[in-house]
Image: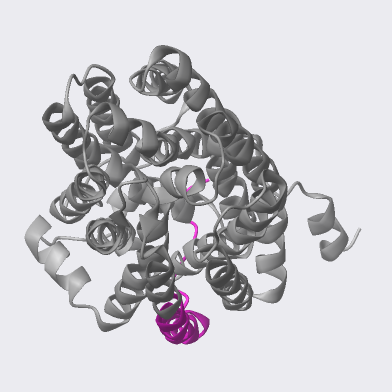
Amino acid sequence: MTKKSQAETLPLFTRYQKFMIAIIAIIQFTIILDFMVLSPLGEQLMDELKIAPAQFSRVVSAYAIFAGLSGLLTAGFADKFDRKKLLLFFYTGFVGGTFLCAIAPDYNFLLLARIVTGIFGGVIGSISFAIITDIFKMETRGRVMGFVQMAFAASQILGLPIGLLLATHFGWHAPFTMIVGFSLLVGLAIVIYMKPINEHLKLKNERSALVHLAKTITNTPYLRAFLATTLLATGGYMLMPFGSDFSVHNLGLRREDLWKLYGVTGISSIILGPLIGKFSDRIGKFNMFFIGTIISGVMVAIYTPLGITPLWLVMVINIILFAGITSRMISASALMTSIPEPKDRGAFMSINSSMQQISGGIAAYFAGLIVVKSKSGVLQHYEQLGYVVIIAMIVALIMMYIVNKYAQKHDKASIITD
């Protein structure tokens, strides 16, 4: 048997790698759901807590901004600990913060709870991506990101519809209680089955935490990647917080129908995610990002000016829009893993995640200043918000092109553990 035929008969992933894909996807599911559940709850929260769009945007942005700041503060330490221990520490804090959301009696307590959740939850994504970079080859990371990205879709298929139904019948606290219960089981699985990931500790890195952070931040190729990520985050964080309010008051959907909208969109995303990941490995990460940007930009231009629209048409538009967004997220995430050297992976991923969170938080805050709610409940200036998002997408595309050129010439990524 030739070497080529032997390679073709080998499984793409080992049994443990499949477990790690699953556990990272489930972790991401809980983190994404915790953040995304605020969007469909927005209309109900603003009504029950008697708060304005600007105040609601602060609840959204508080999580993101403090998640970003936390990531920056921990970046210097990210490569100095076993990644399993680091993951467990921050995941425990995330569950605690979500519990505070589940018992929040008013707006101020909820705002504080989101800050706590952000401080811990915002770091988990960067740790997960560092683990992916440690375990998987660059040639398969598109597929891995495609499966992990299914968490985004699963949060819509399972989490958001169930969360909305719970909120409708038991109040807006109920979805957070659900997340806490499920996350406790996930944490237990990490403790029992996940192996230590500490091979990176054997690499020579005698820098102090602050020096390590400074060296990573001032690395020119890394800076380009951070800027691309900053622009990448702007769009979603601007539009998403007001999605449910826009659907109810501008598009004319019933609150009771929102779970159908998110469920159908999620089903399509969970089908498309692995296919997009596989396709990005085949045609190239940047090419997939380019296609996703074109689709997303066109759909944002169509979506944001809409008035009263039937549910079926809103579903079609959302499916296509999220296909574009998913294409951008999967390809960009896979591309970013090729930028840092092994000794910098944890710090790079932490800073990269921080840039995404902070820029997203700032974007959500300014979105709250642009969008105005009329006395009838209709959101005004949402179309102008769409123009801002499209411009950010175009600039992000240019920056991602530059990052891709560097990645093609200087792919430093390598496997350091099985």
Q: Residue at x 91, y 58 (%)?
A: 1
Whole-percent x, y for residue 411 in the image: 47, 76
Farthest residue in the right direction?
A: 1
Whole-percent x, y for residue 282 in the image: 72, 70
Vertical position of residue 88 compared to residue 312: above or below: above
Q: Please count the marks in the image.
A: 0
Q: Residue at x 66, y 60 (%)?
A: 320
Q: Residue at x 54, y 50 (%)?
A: 251
Whole-percent x, y for residue 323 in the image: 64, 59
Say which of 179 and 172 sits in front.
Answer: 172
Quadrant of res 348: bottom left
Vertical position of residue 334 compared to residue 401: above or below: above
Say which of 25 and 54 sits in front.
Answer: 54
Q: Verify whether residue 359 appears in magenta.
A: no
Main SS class of the magenta portion in the image: helix
Q: Residue at x 25, y 57 (%)?
A: 354
Vertical position of residue 107 compared to residue 227: above or below: above
Which range of residues does the magenta coloring cover? 393-418
Q: Verify whether residue 409 appears in magenta.
A: yes
* 190 to the left or right of 295: left
Whole-percent x, y for residue 50 in the image: 22, 32
